[in-house]
Image (cartoon, helix red, strand yellow):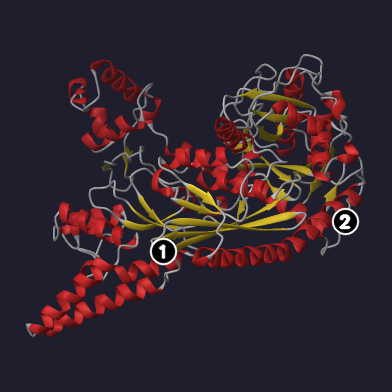
């Protein structure tokens, strides 16, 4: 626990201007990001008597080891920079709203020649119209199924569409009238695009025009005694009305607005958002957060607005945003929203009428979400805490192991030997800190030696990071792979997407030590891991192993294993950690094996990418015909010059088969086409082609 006075800036160092500040821990990890109208006044609040601080704020300042700040011109810039840094550093003490799911949207791909209606999740794409979010994907499909009677827009995937174009036969929806079948030319691209725009207009709330048009056409068909057509139009009107009933009118003035409500207690807060478009509720979503600092309702609303609109622009930000409490000050937030939309945005508290009544409904949803979350979380927190305490007691640790790393070795009969490292913090997975390794120190199958190499390489990197940051000054060492201490890792050697960042924003490697190292194996693997740590002079990290046979927990230097009860939460957590490490290792090992088996002679040609390899195979049909081609014939392939053609010819000549295959019964030479090695077989077909005694022998 650090003393805040040890890193408190000297008087006069902190500027009295707007800015953003960062607290860092002893490992230089950013643990809190905040903004302030006056940095001097705001930071002074953190360096007062600890007894006067909120418990969570006190925990943050005692965890921190330094503070730094960046001056900006306006409060709006501070708001934008704070949002960017929270997204980049993921500070543990900041308010972070957690979606309980990835909400689905109804999307229309207006950026394609033939727009497609589909369900989409994740980041929004340019040129795609979105409606929602919806609570469930089936709600989108029900709505689309009703609307396709009137707006038969394409819903098929690109593969189905191309197959229908090739065969000249539409899919089932085309036969039953729920698709206009642009794939076979029943409708022109222009008419289909107009149909998609009408679909979007209806979903955006402009429903009256289409209903009146269908009712007029129905009446005309009836007057002309075309009763079958009139009946179909009647059913279309019914389908549209049924789709509209799913989103009842809540605001009579056809308002576009988002309503945000907050339910909170001392520890947690739940946020609910209703998206109202054209006076109808078009979507709903909810978040929950831990209140890791003393924070007001207005500040919670501000963080929710950052989360909701931080990556949105244009019409995705509505004209009105109704909230239960205004941020303090409100002007920078309102100006920021206006910039995001490109037009004025009204941020206010509803006082009366329909909007206040709807806000009360949103508030009730937020309260119910908080109650439900606390019911689930109570059991979850209790279980994880008990599991960590049981592990600490069983292994005689000083405290609960809040960060656990687990290692596993995987190979197929000694080939493609790889290792995995998975991380659990507070009993939960931290997938952005997973690592994977190739065993480089030797060839062949030796799990014990492999484990020693992996542990050595991982913790050499950790010591190098400490030395780089000035926290540790040890003897000069060189990693097992021969690279200098602290050198960047290759993509396949500990590579990771995301993860903690260095001062310059680049990912850090192996920056933080665990309290417990778990290895998949028994006494030999545990001894190898402990020996690797001892050789590096690390004695403050516990090691254990979990053997698969009897689920025994092995500890270094002990003759007998520690046996946890089968019903133990601690054993269950160790099993989860071990199984996750095994899954991650197997996935990497299979990918490497499949890549190796898919490799062919064209892979040996320097500078020849996947696109030109595919073009060569498509032009000649096979590697055998390509090998027989002249340099001039190879040059006929687009993108292949003479120098490249000569390189290809040389590479193929070197890899030519020694002799043709012969049928020993008839003496006939078997003319076998070489396979297309650029596409390759899938991992499943590779496994299927193995002999029976080699299947399932991955470790």
Q: Which residue is mark 2?
A: 563
Left of 599 or right of it: where is 665?
left
Asked which quadrant contains residue 84, the reply is: top right
Q: Position of residue 433 (x, y in %)?
A: 65, 38
Left of 254 or right of it: where is 20?
right
C-alpha span from label 1 to label 2: 62 Å
Q: Decide: is 162 above or below 458.
A: below
Q: Are marks 1 and 2 in contact (CB under 8 Å)?
A: no
Q: Residue at x 19, y 70 (%)?
A: 213
- The quadrant of the image that shows the N terminus is top right
Q: Residue at x 59, y 24 (%)?
A: 72
Left of 646 or right of it: where is 338?
right
**Is residue 303 in view from this perspective?**
yes
Q: Nearer the viewer, residue 150 or 359?
A: 359
Q: Which residue is mark 1?
A: 279
Report helix, strand or loop for mark 2.
loop
Q: Position of residue 36 (x, y in %)?
A: 67, 32
Q: Position of residue 186 (x, y in %)?
A: 13, 61
Residue 214 is tagged as none
Mark 1 surroundings: few (<14), some (14-19) or many (≥20) residues within 10 A: some
Q: Nearer the viewer, residue 8 or 694?
A: 8
């Amino acid at each position: 626990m650090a003393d805040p006075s040890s890193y408190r800036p000297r008087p006069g160092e902190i500027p009295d201007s707007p800015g953003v500040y960062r607290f860092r821990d002893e490992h230089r990890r950013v643990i809190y990001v905040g903004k302030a109208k006056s940095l001097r006044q705001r930071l002074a609040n953190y360096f007062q008597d600890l007894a006067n601080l909120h418990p969570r704020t006190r925990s943050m300042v005692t965890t921190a080891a330094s503070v730094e700040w960046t001056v900006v011109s306006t409060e709006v810039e501070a708001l934008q920079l704070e949002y960017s840094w929270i997204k980049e550093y993921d500070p543990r003490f900041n308010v972070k709203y957690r979606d309980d799911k990835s909400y689905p949207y109804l999307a229309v791909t207006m950026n394609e020649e033939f727009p497609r209606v589909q369900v989409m999740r994740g980041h929004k794409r340019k040129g795609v119209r979105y409606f929602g979010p919806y609570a469930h994907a089936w709600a989108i499909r029900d709505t689309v199924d009703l609307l396709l009677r009137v707006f038969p827009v394409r819903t098929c995937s690109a593969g189905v569409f191309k197959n229908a174009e090739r065969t000249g036969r539409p899919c089932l929806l085309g036969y039953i009238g729920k698709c206009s079948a642009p794939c076979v030319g029943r409708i022109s691209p222009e008419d289909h695009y107009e149909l998609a725009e009408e679909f979007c207009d209806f979903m955006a709330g402009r429903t009256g025009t289409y209903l009146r048009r269908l009712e007029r056409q129905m009446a005309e068909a009836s007057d002309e005694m075309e009763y079958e057509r009139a009946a179909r139009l009647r059913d279309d009107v019914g389908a549209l009305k049924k789709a509209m009933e799913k989103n009842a009118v809540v605001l009579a003035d056809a308002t576009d607005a988002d309503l945000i409500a907050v339910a909170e207690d001392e520890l947690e807060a739940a946020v609910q958002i209703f998206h109202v478009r054209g006076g109808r509720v078009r979507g709903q979503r909810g978040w929950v957060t831990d209140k890791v600092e003393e924070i007001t309702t207005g500040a919670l609303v501000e963080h929710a607005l950052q989360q909701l609109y931080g990556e949105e622009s244009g019409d995705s930000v509505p004209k009105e945003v109704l909230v239960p409490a205004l941020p303090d000050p409100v002007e920078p937030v309102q100006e920021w929203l206006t910039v995001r939309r490109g037009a004025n945005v009204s941020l206010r508290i509803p006082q009366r009428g329909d909007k206040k009544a709807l806000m009360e409904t949103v508030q009730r949803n937020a309260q119910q979400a908080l109650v439900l979350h606390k019911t689930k979380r109570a059991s979850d927190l209790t279980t994880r805490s008990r599991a960590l305490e049981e592990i600490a007691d069983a292994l005689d640790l000083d405290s609960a192991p809040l960060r656990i790393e687990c290692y596993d070795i995987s190979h197929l009969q000694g080939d493609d030997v790889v290792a995995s490292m998975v991380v659990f913090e507070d009993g939960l997975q931290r997938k952005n800190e997973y690592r994977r390794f190739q065993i480089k120190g030797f060839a062949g199958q030796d799990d014990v030696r492999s484990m020693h190499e992996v542990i050595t390489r991982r913790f050499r990197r950790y010591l190098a990071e400490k030395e780089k940051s000035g926290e540790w000054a040890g003897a000069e060492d060189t990693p097992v792979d021969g690279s200098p201490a602290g050198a960047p890792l290759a993509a396949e050697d500990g590579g990771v997407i995301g993860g903690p960042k260095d001062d310059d924003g680049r990912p850090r490697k192996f920056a933080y030590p665990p309290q417990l190292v778990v290895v998949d194996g028994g006494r030999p693997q545990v001894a190898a891991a402990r020996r690797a740590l001892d050789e590096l002079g690390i004695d403050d990290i516990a090691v254990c192993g979990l053997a698969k046979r009897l689920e025994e927990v092995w500890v270094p230097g002990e003759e007998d294993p520690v046996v946890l009860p089968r019903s133990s939460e601690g054993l269950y957590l160790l099993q989860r950690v071990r199984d996750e490490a095994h899954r991650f290792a197997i996935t990497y090992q299979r990918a490497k094996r499949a890549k190796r088996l898919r490799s062919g002679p064209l892979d040996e040609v320097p500078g020849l990418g996947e696109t030109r390899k595919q073009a060569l195979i498509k032009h000649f049909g096979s590697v055998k015909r390509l090998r027989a081609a002249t340099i001039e014939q190879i040059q006929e392939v687009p993108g292949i010059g003479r120098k490249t053609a000569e390189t290809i010819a040389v590479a193929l000549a070197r890899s030519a088969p020694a002799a043709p295959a012969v049928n020993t019964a008839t003496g006939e030479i078997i003319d076998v086409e070489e396979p297309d090695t650029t596409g390759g077989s899938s991992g499943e077909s590779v496994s299927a082609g193995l002999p029976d005694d080699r299947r399932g022998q991955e470790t």
